[in-house]
Image: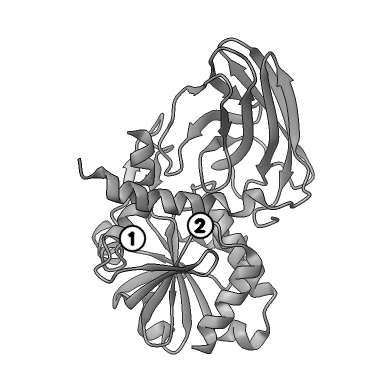
Amino acid sequence: MTFARALRPSALAIAALSCKPSLRSLNEGFAFEPGVPKPDIVLTATDGRPFRLREDTEGKVVLLYVGYTHCPDVCPVTMANLAAALGALSPEINREVRVVFVTTDPRRDTPPVLRAWLDHFDPRFVGLRGDSAQIAAVLQILHLGEPIVVPGANDTTYAVEHAAMVLGFTRDDLAHVGYPFGIRQEDWVQNIQALVKQ
Amino acid sequence: MKLRPSLSRGLRLVLLTALGPACRPAGLPTASATVGDLQLRNGFAYEPITAASGAAYVEIINHGQVADTLVDAESPIAAMVMFHGAAMMSMGPVVIAPGARVTFKPGAAHIMLTTLSKLPKAGDSLPLTFTFAKAGSVTLELPVRKYGSE
């Protein structure tokens, strides 16, 4: 049961897609056709300004990840690998890419907390917050299921179960690919270049 | 039961995950120890970003003839240590069957440390004491590495 529950977010992310995903190759992620739409939603950036996900990333490749800063495992590993891959790529490629992190835990991920955590990886990473209805809407559009709050020993140590997948949006405002956890830095370098070339 | 199809899809993802950073010959330092019939190896921790939480990993192999149970883990620098499944579900005590191997690794089950009194840096070590029902306790000095260093 625990095992099945543990698998649920990833399984949901795949199973819930109306477009049938296929595995292209181990390190290239899952292909989604005809693609997952970039949510046309306004969230709040860490500087307090509204961030229009579509308009404010228009013409850019967007690597979108949904997580929370108290997550000690998949979230920081993913962010660190993306930062390292971008660091290995040219300024020209970097200019074309936006990494966007949407928190599922706006209560603890206040703007300063979220900003400081993202700065640890790359100060260019965009951190977005919203109320629970907005986050639920984003997750629904992305077919990432609902975040599930797992109570902790006290009121501040709860965990938030979530799907650990980076969605790669191209300039057509569609994600044709989703990257599961475990993509290596050198493969991220290849994957980001491929997204920019599309 | 309609669990099967999604489970097999999920399993495919888990297999993918299993081929991630953890099995690369990264050459990064790890800690190991033996206590009773149990072998602990590939132990390490990530450099925590904030005092809120940190993660540690280890592989435990039971070379004995009877099951043992990892009942607890403690660190002098963490208020609480928990065993978490891949999706942050608390696992509780972890049974290691005879001949079996339990693996905590990035993207899968991990050992979560919360409310840290100190933030160890890459190159430091983080002491973590594992307590087993039969084999007793053993402390590993887990080498600390940065996130993304694999």
Q: Position of residue A46 (x, y in %)?
A: 46, 67
Please state if B30 lies on the left or on the right of A43 as rendered: right
Quarter of the image for residue B81 reads top right
Q: Is residue A122 visible?
A: no
Query: In the image, which disc is placed on residue A135?
Result: none
* Residue at image point 75% right, 39% down: B30
Disc 2 residue type? Phe
**Label 2 packing within 10 angstroms: few (<14), some (14-19), many (20+):** many
The Cα atoms of the two marked residues, 2 and 1, are separated by: 14 Å
Q: Position of residue B134 (x, y in %)?
A: 59, 9
Q: Position of residue B65 (x, y in %)?
A: 59, 13
Q: Is residue A133 visible?
A: yes
Residue with the mark numbered 1: A14
* Residue at image point 66% right, 85% down: A91
Question: Relative to B102, is B98 above or below?
Answer: above
Sequence-earlier tag: 2 or 1 = 1
B57 and A45: which one is in front?
B57
* Residue at image point 49% right, 48% down: A71
B100 and B83: which one is in front?
B100
Do circles 2 and 1 both sit on a common chain? yes
Q: Which part of the image, by quadrant, shows the N terminus of chain A?
A: top left
Proximity of marks 2 and 1: CB atoms separated by less than 8 Å? no
Residue with the mark numbered 2: A181
A47 and A12: which one is in front?
A12
Disc 1 residue type? Ile
- Mark 2 chain: A
Task: Give the secondary structure at mark 2.
Answer: loop
Q: Position of residue A5 (x, y in %)?
A: 33, 40
